[in-house]
Image (cartoon, rainbow, N blue to C red):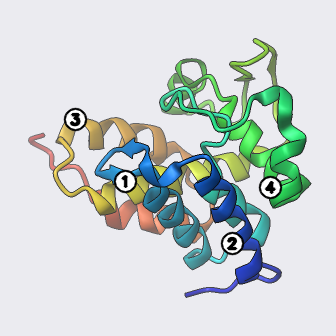
Amino acid sequence: MANPDGLSQDDVDRAVSFLRSHSAEQIPHVGGMLLPHLEGTCELLRTWGDSAELCLAGLCHTAYGTDGFPHPFVAPTERASLESVIGAEAERIVYFYGSCDRAFLYPRLVNGETGTQYRDRFTGTVFEPEPSLYRAFLEVTFANELEIFRRTPRIPWRVKRHWRAIFAPCWGLVSDAAFASFVETLGVRPSNA
């Protein structure tokens, strides 16, 4: 396992304590409970060699809920409470991840508009995100979805096809390790599917 500089067991334990204090181990999620999914997302980011901040963001990526998982632990107006647990940069990534209006962004990704507009679902603001934050968002998105696919083997092909269409245009926007994990996990679409 890769060990990114600065990610200590204390950092992870503090974040997991926060998640447990919000009953993450009792919240159902695809293929099981939420906490193991969050830990698996963090672990994928670690194996890809991502920064401590990105790994912590992956561990807490659902803290504000998401467009597809409406179970927030913290209101987006109370960002300081999460920042005190995982730090400012990791919290910034978590907010950006949770604020994504997927119905707005994902069609743009499928169409190859990989560096265009983003809409914050909490505020409705549309803007062009800074490249490093956008890359962090995509890296966490890859880890989140690929962790689900790895842990839940009986996902229908149509769901896999959906994520292949979103992820394929992201080559060069995520780490080589993340993209290789996508190719390995979802494979090549058969021509007759």
Q: How many marks?
A: 4
| Label 3: element kind | helix
Quadrant of residue 181 within the rendered picture: bottom left
Q: Name which residue lies at 48% across and 29% down.
A: 68
Neighbor class of circle 1 (other Cα within 10 Å; few <14, some 14-19, many 20+) is some
Tell whether 145 sits left or right of 2. Answer: left
Q: Position of residue 173 (x, y in %)?
A: 65, 52
The mark closer to the camera, 2 or 1, is 2
From what the image shows, is residue 193 above or below residue 86?
above
Label 3 vs label 4: CA separation? 32 Å
Label 3 vs label 2: CA separation? 35 Å
Chain-order first, disc 4 or disc 1: 4
Q: Is mark 2 in CB contact (under 8 Å) with mark 4?
A: no
Q: Name which residue lies at 81% across and 15% down.
A: 125
Q: Which residue is mark 1?
A: 148
Q: Amino acid at mark 4?
A: Ala
Q: Is mark 4 in CB contact (under 8 Å) with mark 1?
A: no
